Image (tube, helix red, strand yellow):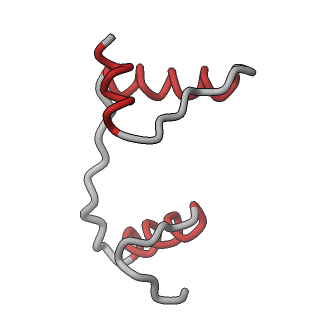
């Protein structure tokens, strides 16, 4: 596997390969946690919005986003 910059994203295949390599070499020290209700709700909202035909609102700056969130 090619070396990547620290902040680059891994494919699912690369991630799986890394985890399995660590497990087989007894170096698996990653802690997986269960998401809390807030995270689960957010993920469900994303899935719902992805499946809906309507488009999500877009914001060009932080001020307009904050204004929408606070109303």
Q: In this view, does 2 lie to the left or right of 34?
A: right
Measured along the vertical axis of the image, is residue 11 above or below residue 68?
below
Q: Residue furthest bottom?
A: 2
Measuring from the top left, give residue 54's x and y in whole percent. 70, 20
Q: Which residue is drawn at 38% across and 30% down?
A: 64
Measuring from the top left, give residue 33's x and y in whole percent. 29, 41
Q: Residue at x 43, y 66 (%)?
A: 19
Q: In this view, does 34 lie to the left or right of 42?
A: left
Measuring from the top left, give residue 37's x and y in whole percent. 32, 20
Towards the viewer: 20 or 48: 48
Towards the viewer: 69 or 18: 69
> To which quarter of the image does residue 38 belong?
top left
Q: Is residue 27 left or right of residue 23?
A: left
Towards the viewer: 56 or 23: 56
Q: Residue at x 30, y 66 (%)?
A: 28
Q: Residue at x 65, y 29 (%)?
A: 50
What quarter of the picture does the C terminus occupy?
top left
């Amino acid at each position: 596997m090619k070396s990547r910059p620290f902040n680059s994203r891994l494919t699912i295949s690369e991630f799986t390969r890394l985890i399995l390599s660590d497990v087989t070499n007894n170096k698996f020290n990653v802690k997986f946690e269960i998401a809390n209700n807030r995270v689960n709700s957010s993920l469900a909202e994303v899935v719902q919005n992805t499946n809906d035909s309507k488009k999500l609102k877009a914001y060009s700056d932080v001020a307009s986003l904050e204004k929408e969130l606070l109303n």
